[in-house]
Amino acid sequence: MKYPNIWRVIGMTIVMTLTFILVSCQKDQPTDPTSSASTNQTLDKNGNSLTAGSFSIFATGLNNPRGLKFGPDGFLYVAEGGIGGNDSTIGKCEQVPFPVGPYKGSPAGARISKISPAGVRSTYADGFPSSGTNPASGGDISGVSDVGFIHGQLYALIGGAGCSHGLEGTYNGIAKVNSNGSWNLIANLSNYVQTHPVAHPEADDFEPDGTPYSMVVVDGNFYVVEPNHGSIEKVTPHGSIERVIDVSATQGHVVPTSIAYHKNFYVGNLGTFPIAPGTEHIYRITKHGKIKIKVDSLTTVLGVAFDERGSMYALEMSTMPGFPSPGTGQIVRIKRSGKFETIATGLTFPTAMTFGPDGALYVSNNGFGFPAGAGQIVRIGVPSDKGGHDQADEGDDQDGKDSD
């Protein structure tokens, strides 16, 4: 049986692993946001000995942290799945299939946090929809999925809303977030995915409102990844929406999740469950919707990023076979040769990453399956890439043309 929805498949394991996670975290992880764990010696995927990055807990007190970006003010803005709720829409609209559905939620259970350079968290905006799956499947929670800036203006990607998520009168989409913390929806992605079906939806695990997960800003527009339907949409700041690519049409149900831009788009995929290590990819996608596999042999990819030298990094949520396992998340750097260099190991259900102005990686850790307030942002020092190289294909150009 396939379990294509990104949060649904993960939720299946939460009940079984939560106790273990909490005990492990209390025992092994520092609780002071300014404290650092020792540098770890480990092996990369090619069996070579190397020194992984130094870890520190940068911030705590988050509710299911997801996408994160540094703002022009130097503060870190973090999207949060929120705390869910008990509102239901059974009998009012199409529901997500059992056992994962029906969802329940709260129209105001999610928020965006703002974290100072010293690691102090404050609420920047709240009152966003938040919803959770059926407790029988883990009760996983989603709300605000990602954040982005255009000309200093903050925008939020909402991924836990919609009637099929138990929240009548709410919609997944992109919201403009005002300086006073208020917000307004500028683009309705719930409506768009319902009126623009993909070629190969997964019928036995279908999300009517979609589950938009990550976005990137390119040339003043948003590019959004929707994992359950398997598509990428372009959204303007004025709210117009158009499809860049239906990934399902050529790749099947690979569950694309994370997106980065470096001359072209690079999209990582989660894949279906149970996890088969080494079977997932990072795809290169041009602005015109041409797709090819750029990197293979990855596992449960929930983040893609490039450093200032053009080196590519992949965030793997869980690397063990079967279902998500706490403490097995990691970050790898893709070398020019195509080999992987392990940058960080031992992460627990990481959900997103971004580079900071200091050159370090900031990662949403304890990203799902934990009580409210247990989410973290982890700072990871990145070792120098002596063989650093622009990872974009030599045949690519800024217009998205492809000479392959």
Image: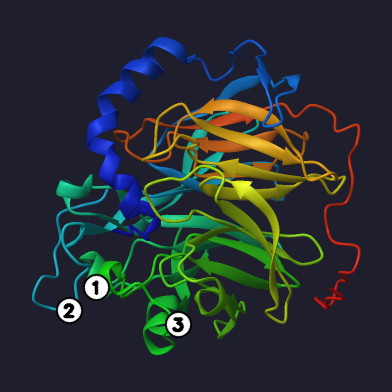
Crowd rating for badge 1 (residues with CA inside 10 Å; few <14, some 14–19, many 20+) = many
Query: Does residue 19 lie above or below 100 as drawn?
Result: above
**Residue at horizontal 70 percent and vertical 78 percent from the top:** 290
Distance Cα–Cα, label 1 vs label 2:
6 Å
**The disc label shown at residue 93, or none:** 2
Quick check: marks 1 and 2 in contact, CB under 8 Å? yes
153, 390: nearer the viewer: 390
Classify mark 2: helix, strand or loop: loop
**The disc label shown at residue 163, or none:** 1
172, 25: nearer the viewer: 25
Q: Is residue 99 left or right of residue 78?
A: left
**The disc label shown at residue 233, or none:** none
Q: Position of residue 197 (x, y in %)?
A: 41, 85
Quick check: marks 3 and 1 in contact, CB under 8 Å? no
State how many labels appear: 3
Closer to the chain start, of discs 1 and 2, is 2
Closer to the chain start, of discs 3 and 1, is 1
Distance Cα–Cα, label 3 vs label 1:
20 Å
Residue flagged by tag 3: what amino acid is it? Val
